[in-house]
Amino acid sequence: MSKRITIDPITRIEGHLRIDVEVDGGKVRNSWSSGQMFRGIERILQGRDPRDAWLFTQRFCGVCTTVHAIASVRAVENALNIEVPLNAQYIRNIIIAAHAMHDHIVHFYHLAALDWVDVVSALKADPAKTSQLAESLSPWPRNSRRDLEAVKAKLAAFVERGQLGPFTNGYWGHPAMKLSPEVNLLAVSHYLQALEYQQVANKVVAILGSKTPNIQNLAVGGVANAINLDNSSTLNMQKLYMVKDLLDGVTAFVQQVLMVDVAAVGAMYADWLGYGAGVTSYLAVPEMPLDTKGTQFDMPGGTIFDGDLSTLKPITSYQDPYFRDNVTEAISHSWYDGDWNKHPWEEDTVPKYTEFQDDGKYSWVKAPRFQGRPMQVGPLAQVLVGYASGNPLVKKWADWMLTTAGAVAGVKLGPNVLHSTLGRIAARAIRCATFSELGLKHWGLLVGNIAKGDTAIFTPWEYPKGEQRGFGFHEAPRGTLSHWVVIRDGKIANYQAVVPSTWNAGPRDEKGQKGPYEACLIGNPVADPERPLEVLRTIHSFDPCLACAIHTHDAEGKELAKVRVL
Amino acid sequence: MSGVEQGETGTGRVAVLGLGNVLQGDDALGPYLAETLSAKYEFAPGVTVLDAGTPGLDLTPFIAGLDALIVIDAVRASGAPGEFRSYRRAELLEKPPPQRLSPHDPGLKECLLTLELIGQSPAEVLLVGAIAGRLDTSVGLSDAVRAGLPQVEAAVLAELARLGVPARPRAHPAEPDLWWEKEP
């Protein structure tokens, strides 16, 4: 008999992601993904000056602030046909790279890893053996026996005080946890170090963005970072070298710690390469522009259909009609009035709530489609598109990951194993390593361009009369983000953001095609319905970011997340 | 206040962080007061006042290594909208953090606990705020919450004084940068 499990962290934040699965015979047979909060945030933008849009859009979400700012200025620049000076592209690109590394480090160590690493088991580890293991895998200097003894002591002191602190809600001792105590200890040690390195990455964004978490240096037409090498209050060599030092530090952590940990932990869970594929059509947009128009990029974009890398069709520029003309959003299973599938420029947002109807409307999230098909977005999409395009950096790090994990697991792994729950986690690390190199590359490009005497940071422009339509995209840490704007006489007439988690977490469409979260859960094992760790593993592998949060402090501290088994 | 100075001021570090989403009605309380305080007062060296938005676990870098943290946030509790509430560290940490489903879910509580593991969690934590009324997608505080602001502001000033880093009223207060409240 099938059991229905609902995972619904309802009380803490006003509506969030809710996942429902039907489990039969220890496997998921049916699934629903539901966004539980109505935002309608685009409506706040109507009538405003498009120059201010990015300030508002970066408040959509507290975690993905810079990405909405960047997509927004790109959308308005696209609508008004504005080219962006090279320095401004490079400065934005360095921010993008640093933000990506920050985000991916936090995702792996502080969100995803705890589904695979049994923190409590680390207390049984032998620090000397852990250190030997670590030093066989990586040249990282902070894996010494002494380092690991200190971590174990810290963890023991925490547990002795009768609390697990941030680890309280883990499924410790769950039968699906399989790492040795030594690997668990190593992972806990790097969890703590990751706290330092995410701060280092954040400092890069703070220096170039003038402020974090909400950057202040963007402008439609460029950036506001005045460049004057002789002035201490502008972007000068001292600040640029500070940025380089910080990038060097994060790069070492990403390449010597994150990549190694993902390969090693992944290898021990190789069976998870067989779960969680779901929707194997992928969409990624090109990123890290190299020219003022957005026609050359360091990271390629494009589509792949049905898991077949030979179907690659590239998206080549900020103006590419292949992207512009093929994105729609459907609402047949979403709590909006009507049943349509419309282009973002034509959409409206009229809420119409019903209860949760398995066969009807059940989510506040719309269902984005590309040529009418559900698409998976995120690091996996970008890595597969990069791999299929023959991008040397992506290939280098993807092959490194597959070879290293394969060697630890004692099997040969090809890119096909990436269509999976673990593949998404591996792809995020591969993307992170790729961006670690690109951040430094674009730092070099910026310094080189300034050395040539180019200090331009902004292209002046004026509003034309009449109506303009634009779209701006950004390959964000969670995948393809696009903003769509209609401008009429210098004011915003319509604005839509099609965000990565909408692509992935969206519900079924009018043809009944499941969204990627829903599809990837089918066949997923569930050993214990009361503790559906395996469902969380697969959902977490996407790095969901749905709430675009509200942050009310909940003083009552009611039951803060719940799993219901019916 | 520029984030660049953050972490470079040495000992005696105190942060006043306004948390909340400026596009969600009364959730803007934290950012609103952070901007208001910055415009009205001068702060002692080592004191950072920041509209921090809704960073979830990304709050960690802003808290790490502080001696004292003051959080201004809208509060969900039983009571009337606008009513003042404050919580000290122990009260904030009383209940375990929630299950994580997305990077937003870890909040202040989880950040404090996580930093404790690396010895960088501030010893003094005070959360002050008012009970939220409306939290829908909208710009601007409700009248009830607006009426409760002076008490929250006074509590922040009292805490800074208690910590030995009192704020001083500016001779020429600036207009607070409440850009999100501007009419389109």
Image (cartoon, grey):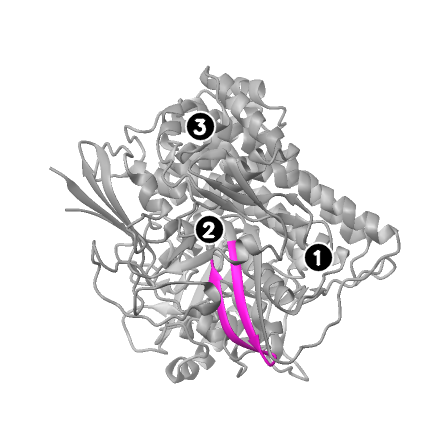
Chain ID, mark 1: A
State the predominant SS element of the stretch in magenta.
Answer: strand
Marks 1, 3: nearer the viewer: 1
A225 lies left or right of A123: right
Q: Which mark is residue A191?
A: none
Disc 2 is placed on an element classified as: helix
State the extent of the magenta-drawn residues as a range: A481-498
| Residue B1 against residue B174 in the figure, above or below | above
Q: Residues within 10 Å of mark 2 (few under 14, many from 20)?
A: many
Query: Tags 3 and 2 in contact by the CB under 8 Å rule?
Result: no
Magenta span contains residue A494: yes
Circle 3 residue: A417
Circle 1 residue: A293
Q: Nearer the viewer, residue B175 or A48?
A: A48
Chain ID, mark 3: A
The amino acid beneath tag 1 is Lys
Q: Which mark is residue B111?
A: 2
Magenta span contains residue A176: no
The amino acid beneath tag 2 is Cys
| Residue A75 against residue A425 in the figure, above or below | below
Disc 3 is placed on an element classified as: helix
Q: Nearer the viewer, residue A134 or A62?
A: A62
